[in-house]
Image (cartoon, rainbow, N blue to C red):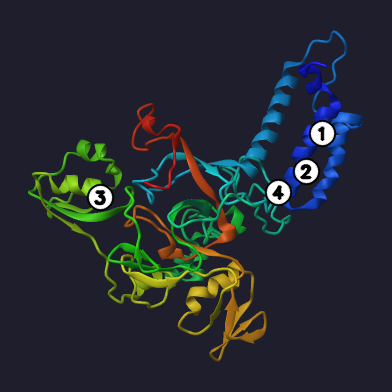
Amino acid sequence: MTVKNIIKNKWVRFTFWTVLYILLVIWMENYWWLFGLAVVFDIFITKKVKWAFWKKTYKEGEKPSSWNEWLDAIVFAVIVVTFINTFFFQSFKIPSSSMEGSLLTGDFLFVDKLSYGPRMPEHPISMRFMHNVFPGANLKPCYVKGIKTDYHRLKGFSTVQRDDYVVFNFPHGDTVLFKLPADDYYTHIRFNGKEYTEKSYGPIIARSYDKADHYVKRCVAVAGDTLSVIDGEVYVNGSKQKNYKGIQYSYSVVTDGSAINPSVLSKMGVNIAETWFNSTMPGYPALTLNAENLAKVQAMKNVVSVTLNIEVSNGNSADMMMLFPFVNTGWSRDNYGPIWIPSEGSTVSLNQGNIALYRRIIDVYEGNDLSEKDGKFFINGEETGVYTFKQNYYFMMGDNRHNSLDSRYWGFVPENHIVGKPSIIWLSTDQNKGFPRNIRWNRFLKFVLKQK
């Protein structure tokens, strides 16, 4: 028997696909799917059911239908891409400059789901290749809200590590304002009140956590860590974070009255769209630079001085309302913490000094009913002074440290919000340029590495 005949043998093919299917079921840890072996058996052996019902059966000598061939190719592509998106890779576009210097606005990424383990779809009935809404349909959801499964993550190669780039669902994305879908709903209600916010910008749209918008940041602290930001520098468990090449800060740059050539700044990778020259200064009040570009700017002949912009808390209540945990901590963007990152199985004592840190975890992320009365805490109707966390949490920050809305502004990222790790930039476009000059060819098919 030739190799070709062996490959075409129905029992060989059945055995091959059966083994793969059983391995998939073991990985999924849901053994009800073993009943699907009956389908596999019928496809290769008994052939009683026409599973590919859309395929036309041709009579002898009948000319194949090109329309039916295209339909078959499309259905096959949808099935294969859906399988790949669920278990292996998914495409994602970076919408903002919060990671500028490492990952750029306009980068199209393939997100690797195997690194941390793929999440099984919580909403199994949804439109393929769309995340949360139909495009141009007034934020109409592209999934059936009423049919939902419990959170389950398959085993991956690793867990989220300190300094990893991570793609995750926006923690505050469970509620969206119809007129301002890209804004943080909770920031609006803290400043403007719930009634005014919903009346002016609503109605509100509720989303499950897995359907919240995708964000990408660097994980600066993992569950169990204690994080501090001191004069803009990140310290974890007392050790200073490595100064990765892509990390950049805002500097006040005073010149002799002349501006720096924009083409020079552009070649350095500075985002010209976010660069402003103040002739009365004269100079740049907030020029974003990494360590390499900082040295270049300091060496320019028309530059008089360069000073790091460090934000110091002035006790202003409006500033406190912007920073997590939204109470008067005395923290600022550049002097933040120390703050402990909750870990699964850890227990904390609850008091008025720390309840603001853990309120959303207890009430929203872990699905309890938290209330307070006469200085006492009640969880699901029972008085308690302690709480044990059900999952791990992470602290995320953008590499563009002075232009990033991150965990300093909305708190911890729950483990069930983690999507995956960006692995490849398959396309990158510059929104400030027209086609084809907007294509960044030097970033085409570029691997995203941890050490930047």
| Residues under numbered marks 4 and 1 in contact, where contact means CB atoms less than 8 Å apart | no
Could you say which disc has been placed on residue 15 in the image? 1
Q: Which residue is disc 3 drawn over?
A: 291
Q: Secondary structure at mark 3?
A: helix
Say what amino acid the circle numbered 1 marks.
Thr
Toward which corner of the image does residue 62 lie, by quadrant? top right
N-term mark: 3 or 2: 2
Nearer to us of marks 3 and 2 is 2
What residue is shown at x 81% (from left), y 18% (from top)? 5
The Cα atoms of the two marked residues, 1 and 3, are separated by 57 Å
Say what amino acid the circle numbered 4 marks.
Trp
Toward which corner of the image does residue 175 lie, by quadrant? bottom right
Relative placement, left or right, of 290 versus 7 is left
The Cα atoms of the two marked residues, 4 and 1, are separated by 18 Å
Toward which corner of the image does residue 11 lie, by quadrant? top right
Percent of width and height locating residue 324: 43, 69
N-term mark: 2 or 1: 1
Disc 3 crowd rating (10 Å Cα; few below 14, some 14-19, many 20+) is some
